[in-house]
Image (cartoon, helix red, strand yellow):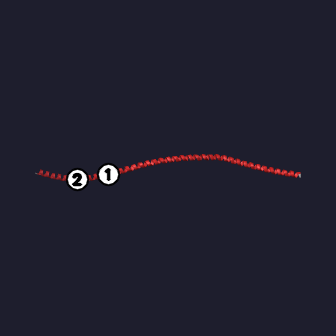
Amino acid sequence: ELGGYVREFETRVRQDMDEIYMRLDDEQIERQLLAGRLNMLFRDRRAHAYTRQLMETEARMSREAWVRATDASDLVHGEVMSLRTTVLGQMSEIRELQAADRRRQTVILELLRIDYRRSIEISELRTALQGQVTALQAHVTTLQGQ
């Protein structure tokens, strides 16, 4: 009976030892998994820091681009307003020049009418003068014949 008790004790000790080794193996595997997760977290931490740095750089560059775009927009707006003022001034000047041109055209037309009337008068005077010259020549011829 002592032998059966020893065998049972030995079997129980072996089972307990097997269970302890299995638990140790499980714990070892769990430690390895945790170490792997920890390493992954350290790698992720570096990747997250790099991503954060990229995002901060992108945000800074975006703010700078927005400021530049706003400045450019303000500059363009100023240029547009300046050009608008220039165009309005030139349009006013064009209207004044058109009015002056119409006045000059009116004067030119009046001068052409006057010139035409004078040319008719000169033509009439020339015709009358030629008639008088012809009459005078006839009179001279008559006087010479006497």
**Please, what is the three-letter code of the amino acid marked with disc 2?**
Glu
- Toward the viewer: 131 or 118? 118
- Say what secondary structure mark 1 lies in: helix
Res 103 label: 1
**Please, what is the three-letter code of the amino acid marked with disc 1?**
Arg
* Residue drawn at point x = 44 percent, y = 48 percent: 81
Residue 56 appears at what percent x and percent y? 58, 46
Query: Disc 2 designates what residue?
Result: 121
- Residue mark closest to the camera, 1 vs 2: 1
- Toward the viewer: 126 or 15? 15
* Residue drawn at point x = 50 percent, y = 48 percent: 70
Q: Residue furthest right?
A: 1
Distance of mark 1 from mark 2, alpha carbons?
Answer: 27 Å
* Residue drawn at point x = 87 percent, y = 52 percent: 5
Judge left or right: residue 63 versus residue 89: right
Q: How many marks?
A: 2
Classify mark 2: residues with Cα within 10 Å, few (<14), some (14-19) or many (20+). Answer: few
